[in-house]
Amino acid sequence: MREDYVQYETGNVGPADASKAPRYSGFATFARLPQQEFVDRADIAVVGAPFDSGVSYRPGTRFGPAHIRQSSRLLRPYNPAADVSPFAEAQVVDAGDIAINPFDISDAVKSVEETADALRKDGTRLVMIGGDHTIALPNLRSLHKDHGEITVIHFDAHLDTWDTYFDAPITHGTPFRRASEEGLIDKEHSLHVGIRGPLYDRSDLRDDERLGFAIISTVEIENEGVERAIERMLQRVGDGPIYLSIDIDVLDPAHAPGTGTPEAGGMTSRELLRMIRALSIKNLVGAEVVEVSPAYDHAEITGIAAAHVAYECISAMAIGLRDRK
Ligand SMILES: N=C(N)NCCCC(=O)O
Ligand SMILES: [Zn+2]
Ligand SMILES: [Zn+2]
């Protein structure tokens, strides 16, 4: 049985109507949005990347996309904090999951890049739900073909600009070093937010700066406040095309226990949502929410956080698209 989808005056097809079919019924698409096949075009597509062969510690993010979708059933179509009805203003769909090889990382990143190319062909913007952080590399490879050097705003406890693990160059701790070496990122404007915790060596920070990133750490957010952090973020990132890469472990483990490499002393979900909201004035050409590992989650805490974070990304993109249509 097909659900009753909300039909907006804009012509866009919205989520299955929770007043006609209970929101806990039916297949779990993101926010109960229509599958891509049900509509003829999409401004924004949510796509799953079930993959965890790049992790250095706890596994399980291959189950992240299904968990985030399940945890997204309660999202409603109007976002009052941002004053936008993202699904009315933009056609948003769920494009399903990418079939990713769990045994061969090179092949895995190739298929993520190819699928991103294909889905973005007609200008559709992607919000990819992971999956481990390895998928940032193929996403940036894909975007670079259309946009040139991309400004990366990277919310994470970790730098993810390390070199290799067991000599492996493509892992969840290394995507931004590879992207920088390949010339994919704008080194004048890229930024990490939420960095904290122990590093391997002080030189990690020197390498990171050389690779093109500035840092707003959680200690700075605490000292200066979120409003000042937002000002600094907006100053750093400029007006070029922006890729928003959000590792859910940027949140404190109290807000996101279900992740593979948790670090104490993180952001609250309220702070993170506010910082994403501030980016609606920028040109967000894509986003990803990664590192949700449901086996370590409780009561969907992490899944719900990730679902709201993805919803806030979609809201910011929908506002940004107003002026660009
Ligand atoms: N969660 C991400 N993306 N990276 C963590 C790498 C941490 C490490 O093994 O040193
Ligand atoms: Zn991380
Ligand atoms: Zn990461």
Image: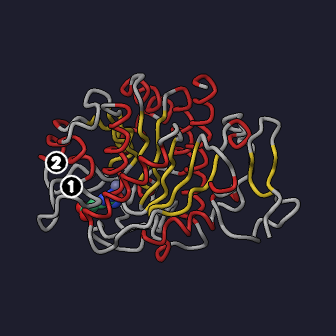
Q: CA distance from mark 2 to mark 1?
A: 7 Å
Question: What residue type is disc 1 on?
Answer: Leu
Q: Which residue is mark 2?
A: 204
Picture disc at residue 199: 1
Quarter of the N terminus within the rendering: bottom right
Task: Name which residue lies at 60% across and 40% down.
Answer: 43
**87 or 82: nearer the viewer:** 87
189 left or right, relative to 254: left
- Queried on whether the Cβ of the residue with tag 2 lies below 8 angstroms from ligand 1, the answer reads no
Question: What residue type is disc 2 on?
Answer: Asp
Task: Name which residue lies at 63% across and 58% down.
Answer: 30
**Colouring used for the render:** secondary structure
- For the residue labelled by badge 1, is the local secondary structure a helix, a strand or a loop? loop
Labelled pair 2, 1 in contact (Cβ < 8 Å): yes
Q: x%, y% of residue 308?
A: 60, 52
Q: x%, y% of residue 152?
A: 36, 38
Quarter of the C terminus within the rendering: top right
| Quadrant observed for ligand 2 in the rendered image | bottom left
Q: x%, y% of residue 320?
A: 58, 29
Task: Of the two numbered discs 2 and 1 on the same chain, state the one appearing first in sequence.
Answer: 1
Looking at the picture, does residue 264 appear above or below residue 136? below
244 left or right, relative to 88: left
- For the residue labelled by badge 2, is the local secondary structure a helix, a strand or a loop? helix
Looking at the picture, does residue 47 appear above or below residue 154? below
Task: Name which residue lies at 68% across and 38% down.
Answer: 81
* Label 1 crowd bin: few (<14), some (14–19), many (20+), radius 10 Å: few
- Queried on whether the Cβ of the residue with tag 1 lies below 8 angstroms from ligand 1, the answer reads no
Q: x%, y% of residue 49?
A: 44, 61
Q: Quadrant of residue 10?
A: top right
Looking at the picture, does residue 187 appear above or below residue 165? above
